[in-house]
Amino acid sequence: MRNVRVHRVGEQIKKEMSRILQQELKDPRIGFVTVTGVDMTGDLQQATVYISVMGDDKQKMQSLEGLSKAKGFIRSELGKVIKLRHTPDLIFKFDESIEYGNKINELLKEVNRKKESGKEENNGDI
C-alpha cells in the first residue's frame, strides 16, 4: 500500500513540476525543459526529477544550472500545492532515454537502408 502512495505523490509532483516550469519560472537559462519522470524515496523525503532538454550540451547545462538555482522556489511552490508534512528535496537529472531511443532509431533506419540497397543490387543480377 505504501508503494501506491509513493507512486501517486511522484505523479503529482511530476504534474506540478511541469506546470511550474511552464508558468512560474522566468529564468532565461531554463530553455525547453520537459519533466519525463519522478522517482520518490520510500519516506517521501527526496524526489529525483528526470528532465529532457531540447538543444545542445551547453543549453542542457545552463538549464540544469537554472533549475538548481531555482530549487528553493520550486520546492516552495510544490509545498503550496501538495500537502505533505515535508516537501521533498529535489534532485534534477537528465533523462538519457529519449536520446538513446533516437540513436537506436537512426541505427535501425541505417540498417533498413542498407538492406534496401542490397536488394536492389541483387535484383539486377537475376
Image (tube, helix red, strand yellow):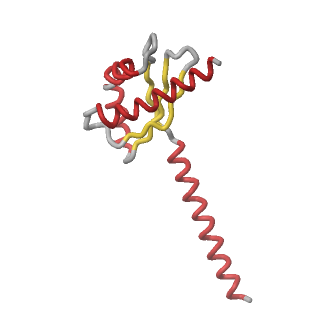
Residue 20, image x, y percentages: 35, 31
Identify which residue is drawn at 51% across, 23% down: 9
80 sits to left or right of 52 = left
112 sits to left or right of 103 = right
Identify which residue is drawn at 51% across, 41% down: 96
117 is higher (above) or lower (below) than 124: above
98 is higher (above) or lower (below) than 115: above
37 is higher (above) or lower (below) than 75: below
Number of numbered discs present?
A: 0
Identify which residue is drawn at 44% across, 12% down: 86
Identify which residue is drawn at 37% across, 47% down: 55
64 sits to left or right of 104 = left
Residue 114, image x, y percentages: 62, 70
Residue 82, image x, y percentages: 42, 20
88 sits to left or right of 28 = right
Residue 105, image x, y percentages: 57, 56
Of all residues, the one furthest to the right in this rendering is: 126
Of all residues, the one furthest to the top in this rendering is: 85
| Quadrant of the rendering where the N terminus is positioned | top right
17 is higher (above) or lower (below) than 123: above
Judging depth in this view, the residue of 53 and 45 nearest the camera is 45
| Quadrant of the rendering where the C terminus is positioned | bottom right
Residue 71 quadrant = top left
